[in-house]
Image: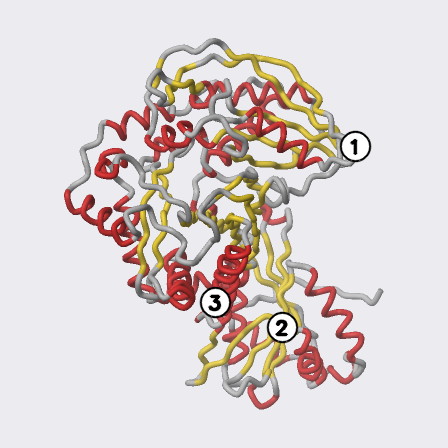
Amino acid sequence: MRLTNVTHLRLPFGRLWGYDVSASDLGRRLPVSFDQRLHVGAGDRPGSWMALSFRLPAPTRRESIADAWLAVIARHGTLRTAFAPGADGDPVLHEIEVGPGHWVEHEVGPGQAVNDALRDILDEACSPYRRPSHRLCVLETAAGLTVVIAADHAHVDMWSMLVIARDLLSALDAGSAGMTPAARTAPAFVEHTQALLDRDAAPDRVRRRWGDIIEDSGGVMPRFPLSLGAPEHHRERVEVRDVFDVDDAAAFAAQARDDGVSTLARAVVAMTAVTRELADAPLRAVFPVHSRFDDNWHDSVGWFITNSVLESDLAEPHAAASAVREAVQLGAWPLADVLAPWGDMPVAPGMFAISWLDLRRLPVRIDSIGLDAQYVGAATATDGVMLWFILDESGLHLRCRYPDTTEARANVGGWLDLLVARLQAEARSSVRGRLHVAGRTFRIERASRDDIEDIAALLLDDQFGADRESVELERYESAFSAVARDGSHYLGVIRDSADRIVATMQLTVIPGLSRGGSTRLQIEGLRVAAGERSQGLGAAMLEWAHEFGRARGARLAQVTTDEARDRTRAFYARLGYQTAHVGLKRHL
């Protein structure tokens, strides 16, 4: 899922609507979590919210969307709460009733971008002390409807936004089928808050470790190790980068598995190495960890996040894995008790935080690609560095927010440049790209434009190549451009130890409805150089192709070959391919 910021949000022009719900007076007082107290205690301000945008898959009446939204609010208790300033200055949380309201059209001014108009709306509607501090917006365009759901961060986290979107879509489906959305409520976040407040205090070893890390950070929470400029709030600079596509993400994960560690640990290795190289310091950062310890909370909405600290000194997989495990353990205890020696969380300008979320492992899923779903961050001033990683079916994405100063642009931007380059290099050198054949090692990688001539030569050096292939490279270059633009294709080349291209194949993932909605892997143009044939390289390539297909949900692999290729057909048959179907072709 794309990680973006409201300034960078891609929205078409159209009519912008917001749904004004009705809210009761403040009711019963409720427990406040540690993070909520810190966040809301900073007061009403713009940019304290987070949002999710997605396109509705079918034309939908605004009245139906409003009904579905009210069903979501009824299901999740935190959306029926509101904060108010307490007598001692600390925020107090109250239960409220939320009922039907009405749609309001928000004007997009002359020359104003739609996302700027949206930002103004959400800054006002979703600040910490609003009642309620969430907002449903709909953008009507000729191409359809885009929904934006935002809430002050005190009530939601990234996981929660998926739950909200899923439940809204389910309620819309129920409404379109003439049914009433399920009235079952999810466990309320305030119950989770109370459960944490009731937990035992942290053991001495946890307190000591927190103390060591804070002391090593100068008596405050970890800070970015390079200069950010004047230690004060500045306008933010937000960078959004797509680190891996699905192929590099699979390669990076394969290397992590080979190392016996998680993908996160492998990323921590890279961040540790970059920090050591640029700052001659260990990686030390605030590390948010989710607190949905029990399955009971998986379908709930709330700020199920507690802060921990991550310290990684050695750029080695198992050391990094130990650092991650320790961070998770340090975040498993009530923070108010742990941080009591400092009076509260000792925050200072330059605080550095790293967040990691693997959407593929969450029990809550939406079709983020089909819905064009985007996580949307608010625009705000900042004096620190916040880095978010999102790993999903399309790859690894990051968003980084830092002060927009000359020093931060150079230092944080340089740190990001080196980190992304290192992560991508590690993906390219992953064990997933190595083929071990008869005591030799080959490397498979995505073809580049520089490889076209070698690929054409392999296609030409074939039993039927002289009749079917061309010597005009322009035709191959044009075809390469078409293949490279389409993410469903993988054109691979195989290199030997001398970096010579000795084989090629093209893989295509084909979704379909037949066979119960099975996705297929089509294998075409598999060619091996004459000097490498009959030694097992082709079989190794096919096995790699099968893993490629499985990683993308393919349940069937298929190839076509000329009836006259007796040896080729025998080769595929030995590897389990059956001639149970007749393939027909004609020239167009």
Reply above or below: 329 against 460.
Answer: above
Residue 447 x %, y % = 63, 73
Mark 2 or mark 1: which comes first in sequence?
A: 1
User: What residue sits right under mark 1 in the picture?
Assistant: 110
Mark 3 and mark 2: Cα distance apart in space: 20 Å
Residue 145 x %, y % = 70, 32
Q: Which mark is residue 264?
A: none
Q: Nearer the viewer, residue 585 or 423?
A: 423
User: What residue sits right under mark 2 in the picture?
Assistant: 447
Q: Amino acid at mark 2?
A: Ala
Q: Is residue 555 visible?
A: no
Mark 3 or mark 1: which comes first in sequence?
A: 1
Mark 2 and mark 1: Cα distance apart in space: 47 Å
Q: Nearer the viewer, residue 401 or 58?
A: 401
Q: Amino acid at mark 3?
A: Arg
Q: Is residue 117 visible?
A: yes
Mark 3 or mark 2: which comes first in sequence?
A: 3
Q: Which element carries disc 3, helix, strand or loop? A: helix
Reply above or below: 95 against 246.
Answer: above
Q: Quadrant of the C terminus?
A: bottom right
Q: Furthest-front residue in view?
A: 230
Q: Which mark is residue 422?
A: 3
Reply above or below: 323 against 11.
Answer: below
Q: Which quarter of the picture shows residue 573?
A: bottom right
**Residue 538 vs residue 271: left or right?**
right
Disc 1 crowd rating (10 Å Cα; few below 14, some 14-19, many 20+) is few
Q: Which quarter of the picture shows residue 156?
A: top left
Mark 3 and mark 1: Cα distance apart in space: 44 Å
Q: Amino acid at mark 1?
A: Pro
